Image (cartoon, rainbow, N blue to C red):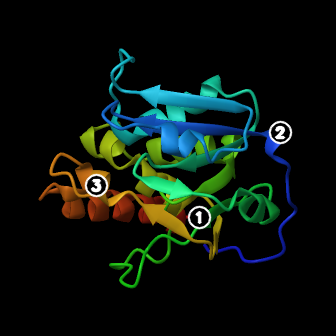
Amino acid sequence: MDCGGAGVSITADKVSAVLITRGDVDLGPILETLPYEDVVVWDGRERDEHPGTYGRYLAMSEARNDVIYLQDDDCIFRHHNELLTGYEPGVLTAVYGHGENPDGLDDMALVHGGAVVDRSLSLSAFDRYLERWPVDEGFYREADMIHGTLCPHKHVDLPYEIRMEIATRPSRMANQPWQRDLKHEITNRARAVRDSR
């Protein structure tokens, strides 16, 4: 569902940034790079709900703008003007983040390195998923896989940095022994929804 094509472009004042963290990371280095006036942070320490990565999408409801910038708390992204130049309504525009081995996931978009998307597109993807599959632990933990599979998307080739001192912590979800299997299970569920239309 990679939707290549010319971007429309949007200015930073029309975009809200939404960040998610468990609250154990200094967001200062990320916040310094953001050109967006409206920034919403879903901090797990300060929220009553703990919906895993789905908190990223719940936080969209608090954003002032309908176009949303996303990234993870263990990445630094600096090329916002170039990313916004690639924006298209109705398309998730994501920095290519699969690395040299996409592990069978090259048909979907990851948002961790930086992405811009219409809020309505994101929410519609979850509505579609929930017409067929339940809200369960996999839904909450791997919401990004659902989002990246069900949103029409395109990749842009822009650099970002991984904050290795954070990404390599044993407590990070990506470092859990069960995470790869759950990620693929939820992605396959989302593919079944995507491919049924």
Name which quarter of the figure residue 124 lies in: top right
Q: CA distance from mark 1 to mark 3?
A: 42 Å
Amino acid type, mark 2: Asp
Name which quarter of the figure residue 183 lies in: bottom left
Q: Which mark is residue 197?
A: 1
102 to 53, vertically: above or below: below
Residue at coordinates 64% horizontally, 39% vertically from top-left?
Answer: 17
The local secondary structure at tag 2 comes to helix
Image depth: mark 1 or mark 2 in front: 2
Q: Mark 2 sits on what residue? A: 13
Amino acid type, mark 1: Arg
The x, y position of residue 184, in whole percent, is 29, 65
**Front-lying residue, 61 or 22:** 22
**Front-lying residue, 1 or 189:** 1
The local secondary structure at tag 3 comes to helix
Instruction: Confirm or deny contact between disc 1 and disc 3 (CB under 8 A).
Output: no
29 to 51, vertically: above or below: below
* Left or right: 44, with 11 as reference point: left
187 to 172, vertically: above or below: below
Image depth: mark 1 or mark 3 in front: 3
Residue at coordinates 32% horizontally, 78% vertically from top-left?
Answer: 103
* Left or right: 170, with 83 as reference point: left
Within 10 angstroms of label 3, few (less than 14), some, or many (20 or more) residues?
few
